[in-house]
């Protein structure tokens, strides 16, 4: 529990100190914001700052800092360091600078920022990539909640239809009508759940593995995990540390802020809050899997079904290991029901069902905004929004139908989505670095995390069994070479920029 406590304190200190550093480097001022300058009662609407914070938090969080943190702790206490340092120096900086950049450019999305700072070819690629990611996330966050809800009441397909209709509403209606009213309530419920679980953690004071007990990969020996710590940990825990998905969501709130000075508490602050959520659930995972917590929260009958297998791992009677039997959603529902009773079960339902539904709805809305910017169309009428959204909904329905026919499709595709969101993070950090360099500001703020994330996504793509499946050492060498090439390219560009500016002076 010492590592957990120190990590929580570090996040608060990081927000107060490093968040202020990021703010001073960017330099918010009193210029008129897009919410005022381009007000259209649809996407550009001034909202109260507390409401923007809650929407931003829920948009970027969803189930990411819960499920990702649970699976990330399978690698061991090193997860604490990634959440803390990744969040403070990477994710929160990524969210703040990219969110403020969006506000400076009329609330434009990540693809348009890519075009402004990395070139037209990069813009075209990012439009296709982000559109694909948004529709994938939206479509695949329909079926899983429908399965859970049908187990409580109603038919599975009924819930599929209702959830998709909700997505249509969040995509088509003004942001203050559905998202602005519903999301803050869901965000509050998630925060209440995390606070309640955190209080029980401190009350129970379980003996848990600490950071100084070893930063190596605990997964293979204790849980039978086959993935290497690097780069798998840094892709598994995205939300809560660094996530490029956030750069697709921040523009929605950049269009609703009345002052640039709201940026640090909203963009940086929401990311730090998400890091706190990840810390709580990573610690729960440590308790559950490394401190035999599963024995405390499961029925004696279920516990008796587990024994040590021939490989020394604890296995269920059907042969499944602990992490195969207790997946992330099961850990959430089991812990909440055991520790918080009926209220916990309800909160767990909100976390496991409402969070992905809201994330899916925001993803479809983001897809519409990306298309709007790419095609240069106005969205002032319901008809124009519907015509633009129909292709997005059609692709989403096709993906949904494929998933229903392929039950294992979610786990397969989601591996690519996890890698894709980290690729977007690397691209966004390079965008921020180019901006800071152009403005003669301290670009090392984003350059260092950009280099690290480039190394992570490159190595993961080369080594992952779902992609090229190269051996560990060659993939690391190739990833290092490609990352160095990116750094050299940036350095050459920076030298040319400085020379050009000197000539003009």
Image (tube, grey):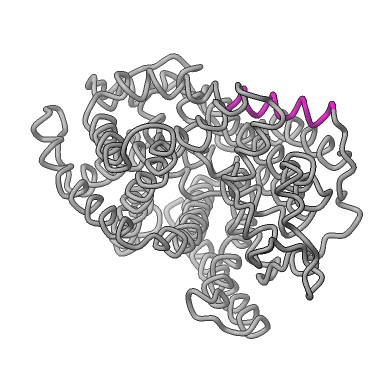
Query: Residue, x 70% and y 58% (percent of image)?
Result: 322
Could you say where residue 331 lies in the image, as x and y percent from the top left? 64, 44
Q: Is residue 335 above or below residue 425?
A: above
Query: Residue, x 42% and y 22% (percent of image)?
Result: 257
Query: Residue, x 30% and y 53% (percent of image)?
Result: 131
Give the magenta-colored segment's residue range: 190-203
Type of secondary structure dominating the magenta stretch = helix
Q: Is residue 362 above or below residue 294?
A: above
Could you say where residue 279 lies in the image, as x and y percent from the top left? 71, 40
**Position of the N terminus by quadrant:** top right
Which of the 4 image quadrants contains residue 153? top left
Of 105 and 426, the residue lying toward us: 426
Could you say where residue 146 lies in the image, as x and y percent from the top left? 37, 41
Of 136 and 319, the residue lying toward us: 319
Which of the 4 image quadrants contains residue 41? top left
Could you say where residue 228 lies in the image, as x and y percent from the top left? 69, 70
Q: Is residue 11 left or right of residue 185?
A: right
Task: Name the outermost residue toward the front.
Answer: 301
Of 318 and 502, the residue lying toward us: 318
Q: Is residue 133 left or right of residue 323?
A: left
Query: Residue, x 65% and y 41% (percent of image)?
Result: 278
Of 120 and 201, the residue lying toward us: 201
Task: Name the outermost residue toward the top.
Answer: 48
């Amino acid at each position: 529990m010492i590592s957990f406590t120190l990590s929580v304190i570090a996040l608060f200190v990081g927000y107060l100190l490093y968040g202020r550093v990021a703010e001073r480097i960017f330099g918010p001022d009193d210029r008129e914001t897009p919410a005022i300058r381009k007000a259209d009662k649809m996407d550009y609407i001034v909202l109260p700052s507390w409401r923007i914070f809650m929407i931003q938090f829920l948009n970027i969080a969803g189930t990411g800092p819960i499920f990702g943190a649970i699976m990330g702790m399978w690698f061991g206490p090193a997860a604490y360091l990634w959440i803390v340092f990744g969040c403070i120096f990477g994710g929160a900086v990524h969210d703040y600078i990219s969110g403020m950049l969006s506000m400076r450019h009329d609330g434009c999305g990540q693809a348009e920022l890519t075009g402004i700072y990395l070139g037209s070819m990069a813009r075209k690629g990012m439009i296709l990539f982000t559109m694909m990611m948004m529709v994938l996330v939206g479509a695949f966050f329909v079926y899983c909640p429908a399965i859970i809800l049908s187990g409580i009441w109603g038919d599975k397909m009924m819930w599929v239809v209702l959830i998709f209709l909700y997505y249509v509403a969040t995509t088509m209606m003004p942001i203050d009508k559905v998202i602005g009213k519903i999301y803050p309530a869901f965000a509050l419920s998630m925060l209440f759940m995390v606070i309640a679980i955190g209080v029980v953690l401190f009350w129970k004071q379980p003996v848990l593995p600490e950071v100084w007990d070893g930063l190596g990969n605990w997964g293979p020996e204790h849980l039978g995990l086959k993935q290497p710590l690097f780069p798998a940990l840094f892709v598994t825990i995205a939300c809560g540390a660094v996530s490029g998905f956030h750069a697709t969501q921040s523009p929605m709130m950049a269009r609703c802020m009345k002052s640039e000075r709201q940026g640090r508490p909203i963009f940086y602050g929401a990311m730090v809050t998400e890091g706190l959520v990840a810390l709580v659930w990573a610690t729960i995972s440590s308790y559950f899997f490394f401190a035999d917590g599963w024995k405390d929260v499961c029925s004696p009958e279920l516990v008796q079904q587990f024994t040590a297998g021939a490989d020394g791992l604890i296995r269920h009677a059907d042969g499944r290991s602990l992490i195969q039997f207790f997946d992330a959603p099961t850990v959430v529902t089991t812990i909440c029901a055991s520790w918080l009773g009926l209220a916990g079960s309800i909160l767990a339902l909100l976390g496991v069902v409402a969070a992905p539904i809201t994330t899916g709805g925001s993803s479809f809305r983001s897809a519409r905004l990306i298309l709007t910017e790419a095609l240069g169309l106005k969205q002032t009428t319901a008809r124009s929004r519907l015509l633009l959204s129909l292709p997005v909904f059609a692709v989403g329905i096709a993906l949904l139908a494929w998933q229903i026919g392929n039950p294992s499709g979610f786990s397969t595709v989601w591996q690519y989505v996890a890698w894709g969101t980290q690729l977007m993070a690397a691209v966004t950090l390079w965008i921020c670095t180019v901006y800071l360099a152009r403005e003669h500001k301290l670009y090392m703020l984003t350059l260092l995390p950009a280099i690290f994330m480039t190394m992570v996504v490159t190595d993961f793509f080369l080594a992952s069994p779902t992609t090229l499946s190269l051996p560990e050492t060659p993939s690391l060498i190739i990833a290092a070479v490609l990352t160095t090439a990116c750094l050299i390219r940036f350095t050459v560009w920076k030298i040319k920029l400085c020379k050009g500016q000197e000539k003009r002076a």
